[in-house]
Image (tube, rainbow, N blue to C red):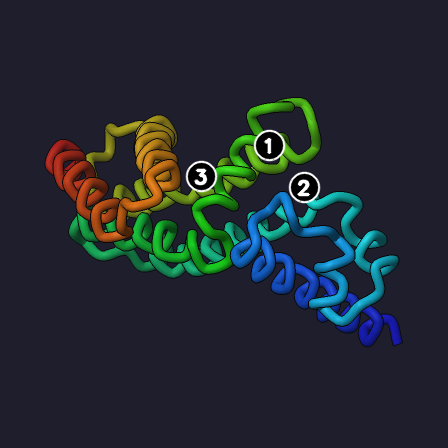
Amino acid sequence: MTGLRERQKADRTRRILEAASRLFRDQGYDPVRIEDIAAAAEVSAGTCYNYFSTKGDLLLAIVSMEVEEVVEAGEAVVLNPPPDIAEALDRLIRLYYDHSLHYLSKPMWRTAMALSIEAPGTPFSQRYTALDGLLAQQVCDLIAALQARGHALPGIDADALGQVIFNSLNQLFIEFVKADQMPLADLHRVSARQTASLAVLMRA
């Protein structure tokens, strides 16, 4: 019985998040009310408020869903990376970038980033920072995996370099999100150029 209740709760949560994602995309973040989201998800407003107190909570949950899915997909790259360093980095980073617009639009990302910056001590901001940490750690883990297989120089500090690479790809993503007319292909091109240069320095 407990398992059934948990599945039902997970199903309702997913419906609420998918409805919120659609409405935020179609109408923008500010005009949408939690009551609108509840109606679109076919749940009561009270149920929606029980799960998410504010629209900010909903937006963060959508960001969390996006990051958790992309981290899960990235594990396959970390566990079995291509021997070519540039290809390995590109494959992981492309996963991040390609999935980034699955649930969130560029305006939604801008809102999430702004909320995290405006009040750095809030649970929203702290969770947003923790999600970035998950992605950064996966980049570090990929470098360590390349070292373990003899593809990357063993003397490199995998954690330090992984943080540098993540900070760079994150900054590129911020610029991408800020520029409404910038296509994803341009983001991939700039990122690939950077990883190609880094790969030359990292090769064993």
> What element does badge 3 sit on?
helix
The residue positioned 75% from the left and 66% from the top of the image is: 39
First in residue order: circle 1 vs circle 2: 2
Foreground of the two, 71 or 49: 49
Which class describes the residues within 10 Å of circle 1: few (<14), some (14-19), or many (20+)?
some
Which class describes the residues within 10 Å of circle 2: few (<14), some (14-19), or many (20+)?
some
The residue positioned 64% from the left and 63% from the top of the image is: 19
Identify which amino acid the numbered label 1 is placed on.
Leu
First in residue order: circle 2 vs circle 3: 2
Distance from the alpha carbon under mark 3 to that under mark 1: 23 Å
Q: Quadrant of residue 56?
A: top right
Horizontal side of residue 157 vs 42, given as left or right: left
Disc nearest the viewer among 2 and 3:
2
Image quarter (top left, top right, bottom left or bottom right) of the N terminus: bottom right
Write down the residue under mark 3: 137
> What element does badge 2 sit on?
helix
Identify which amino acid the numbered label 3 is placed on.
Gln
Identify which amino acid the numbered label 2 is placed on.
Gly
Distance from the alpha carbon under mark 2 to that under mark 3: 25 Å
Q: Quadrant of residue 95?
A: bottom left
Q: Which mark is residue 115?
A: 1
